[in-house]
Image (cartoon, helix red, strand yellow):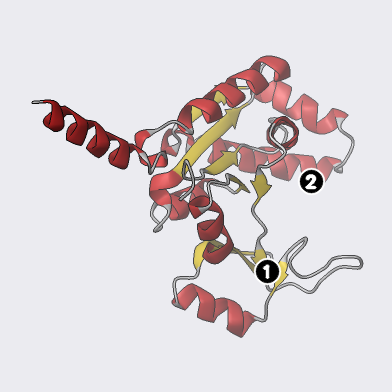
Amino acid sequence: MADRRGLLIILSSPSGAGKSTLARRLMEWDTELEFSISATTRAPRPGEEHGREYYFLSEDDFRQQVSNGQMLEHAHVFGNFYGSPAGPVREAIQSGRDVLFDVDWQGEVQIRNSELGKHALSIFILPPSIKELRRRLETRGQDSADVISKRMMKSWDEISHWGYYDYVLINDDLATTEEKLKTIVSAERMRRIQQPRLQDHVRALQYEFESMS
């Protein structure tokens, strides 16, 4: 039996709030942290491998896994299905390994309501302002003006669901937010439900106490 159960760490934010950078720094801080590999019905792109970037499934197989309860969460995006297979995550949790998820609020709700939801830790990253959010999207130089406008339109819908999350961090300073994130993860690893050996230890204490009386 592992000393502790793993966590399902869910990070969500509108695009440009710093989620990807924080996720990368979190994985650099703890190199044993695993990133959840999603399943998808889209075709592999050049250089992508099954089980590395994604689990590539046919639509029939994907639907069957959803029907059988084998997906923690799933969504239909731009004509393809995406989801998080439960099997690898369940194995990691039982072995005491944490798994990091990059999903939106709908994925957070599905994971929270799944069989492994009691091990979930959800954190939402807010930008300091909408003006700063747009500035970050523009300065990173990855998207056209039209794409940036669409991302900005979507951002408020994402932000409006902040209340679903266990923790909400305002990312006005990346280094400070990173330290807060590490503190949250460290503390949540010590939750009672994450420590399967506690019950046996308390029983041993009880037996010891009773043997003294």
Residue at 45%, 55% in the rendered image:
110
Query: Which residue in the protein does label 2 denote?
Result: 147
Left or right relative to 21: residue 172: left
Position in image of residue 57 (x %, y %): 68, 77
Residue farthest front in this picture: 212
The mark nearer the N terminus, 2 or 1, is: 1
Q: Callout 1: few (<14), some (14-19), or many (20+) C-alpha neighbours within 10 Å?
A: many
Q: Amino acid at mark 2?
A: Val
Q: Are marks 2 and 1 in contact (CB under 8 Å)?
A: no
Q: Can you tell which quarter of the image residue 186 is in?
A: top right
Inspect this view and state whether residue 125 appears: yes
| Alpha carbon distance from label 2 to label 1 | 23 Å
Residue farthest bottom in this picture: 60
Q: Quadrant of the C terminus?
A: top left
Residue at 50%, 73% in the rendered image:
66
Give above or below for 53 relative to 127: below
Q: Secondary structure at mark 1?
A: strand
Q: Amino acid at mark 1?
A: Thr
Left or right relative to 123: residue 171: right
Q: Can you tell which quarter of the image residue 119 is in?
A: top left
Q: Secondary structure at mark 2?
A: helix
Give above or below for 22 relative to 91: above
Give above or below for 76 relative to 150: below
Give above or below for 33 relative to 67: above
For residue 40, the mark is 1
Q: Nearer the viewer, residue 153 or 129?
A: 129
Position in image of residue 179 (x %, y %): 64, 19
Residue at 59%, 63% in the rendered image:
83
